Image (spheres, rainbow, N blue to C red):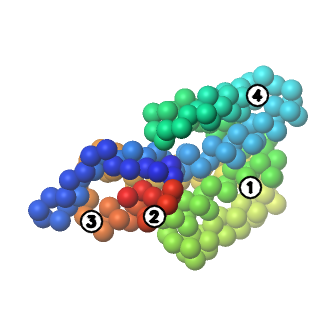
Amino acid sequence: MLRAFPYWSELNHDGWTTVVWCGGNPAIWWEILPALIVSGARAIKQRSISWSFPPIAYCGYMLIFLPLPRYLFIYDYMPMCEAGILAIAGGLTLSWIGEADSWEQILLLMPSLAVLVCALHLLIGIAVFAGILLIWSVLYRQKKLYAGRFVCASMTLLIAVVFAYFYPLWSSLPLSHSAYMQRMWFRGPGLANWM
């Protein structure tokens, strides 16, 4: 996700850009690490093979690529992403049924801060995230189940909205130049560059 780039792009004469972009859904990719932490903690706490699988599969597959001197592409990451999605599904399911602890719920909400800051810019993103945390804390005080369902619903909604937002980049739907630039969250020299 730090070096996403276009496989193919074309700037039309009327100012529209079409592109096929090598990047995933940031809401999913950034949710994977917190979900793996929750999964690993559950694996240790419950001594469960099913909770152990996602972090072991993710880390084991990543170890394969550590000695490679070349850049990794999105297709190299896909098996790790699938293990991470299993961890996300487990963490959000725990939240939905009301069994996730408060630290697990907050940890699962944290990637929304990164997405909101990138999409809405710093101050607005932080303000929206603070509102989300406020709603979560009110619901948590009322009933843990309500807070967990809020975490599950808000993260699922965020993933769906980010999918819709980035879909034109994956499918070569025409975008205005300004709409294209809004979706390039990381720009400039260095490792984090989506241009």
Residue 49 badge = none
Return the disc, 1 or 4, that comes first in the chain's sequence.
4
Q: Nearer the viewer, mark 2 or mark 1?
A: 2
Disc 2 + disc 1, Cβ < 8 Å? no
Label 3 crowd (10 A; few <14 / some 14-19 / many >=20): few
Label 2 crowd (10 A; few <14 / some 14-19 / many >=20): few
Return the disc, 3 or 2, that comes first in the chain's sequence.
3
Return the disc, 4 or 3, that comes first in the chain's sequence.
4
Residue 189 badge = 2
Q: What type is the residue that disc 4 sits on?
A: Ser
Q: CA distance from mark 1 to mark 3?
A: 36 Å
- At which x and y percent is residue 171? 30, 44
Return the disc, 2 or 4, that comes first in the chain's sequence.
4
- At which x and y percent is residue 138? 75, 64
Q: CA distance from mark 1 to mark 4?
A: 21 Å
Q: What type is the residue that disc 3 sits on?
A: His
Residue at 82% x, 25% y is 48
Looking at this view, name the residue that lies furthest to the bottom: 123
Report whether 186 appears left or right of 140.
Answer: left
The residue identified by callout 4 is: 52
Residue at 78% x, 36% y is 40
The residue identified by callout 3 is: 177
